Image (cartoon, rainbow, N blue to C red):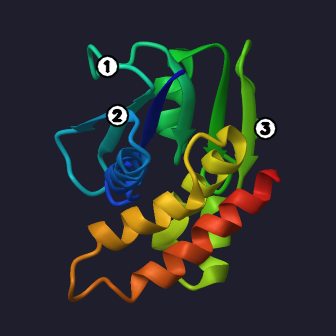
Amino acid sequence: MIERIIIAGSGGQGIMLLGKVLATAVLKEDKQVSWLPAYGPEVRGGSAHCSVIISDEEISSPWVDKADTLIVMNGVSFKRFRERVKKGGSIILNKSFVPKKAVVKGASVLQYPFTEIAAKLGNVKVANIVALGCYLGEKNIVRVKSVFKAMQDIAPEQGKRELIEINKRALLSGKELVE
């Protein structure tokens, strides 16, 4: 089994955190994983993307040319990365920032309002974790329990621990979208 994922959006949308949480959860399940972050020249508001590869076997390169799954948080990233999904792949799209019905020939597109869901939970910054939950529900490659443990490991002892609970709710809300 090998799953190649590209996660894209703008700086400040938690793109790197989404990838890091997913990669950390995969490690907890004793699978092979690579995580490769990439930033645009700007920080907040500029482009940000990362790739995650999950495999049962050793990974020879962290580069993802054609993704099995593309998780996209905004319209600019959708335009930039939609051609990098392999035929038969999946696109998980934040409908909050790409309101039109998105179509990509040869790929299935799941479109949900991650940002609106996050706002209803009380913090728009957890939209990335809603998207991760949607991915988990769609692909069923990593257990929710492993993601919860990864969140606890990544959150610093002081300052962000209170965000773990809202992130757990965000993850479950995203997963429920596809169940």
Report the quarter where the N terminus lies: top right
Q: Dot 1 surroundings within 10 Å: few (below 14), some, or many (20 or more)? A: some
Q: Based on the displayed image, in which of its 4 quarters is residue 88 positioned?
A: top right
Q: CA distance from mark 2 to mark 1?
A: 7 Å
Q: CA distance from mark 3 to mark 1?
A: 35 Å
Residue visible at 40% across and 13% down? 65
Q: Which residue is mark 3?
A: 101
How far apart in space, not on screen, are marks 3 and 2 (Cα)?
32 Å
Q: What residue is shown at x 26% (from left), y 16% (from top)?
A: 61
**Residue 116 seen by the camera:** no
Residue farthest toward the left in the current orientation of the protein: 41
> In this figure, which residue is indicated by the disc labeled 2?
33
Q: Which residue is mark 1?
A: 59
> Depth check: 92 or 12 in front?
92
Q: Nearer the viewer, residue 2 or 116?
A: 2
Of badges 3 and 2, nearer the viewer stands 2
| Element assignment for label 1 | loop
Direction right: furthest residue: 179
Local crowd size for mark 2, using a 10 Å CA cut-off: few (<14), some (14–19), many (≥20):
many
Q: Residue at x 58, y 60 (%)?
A: 144
Amino acid carrying mark 1 in the image: Ile
> Residue 176 in the image: x percent, y percent?
77, 61
Secondary structure category for the residue under label 2: strand
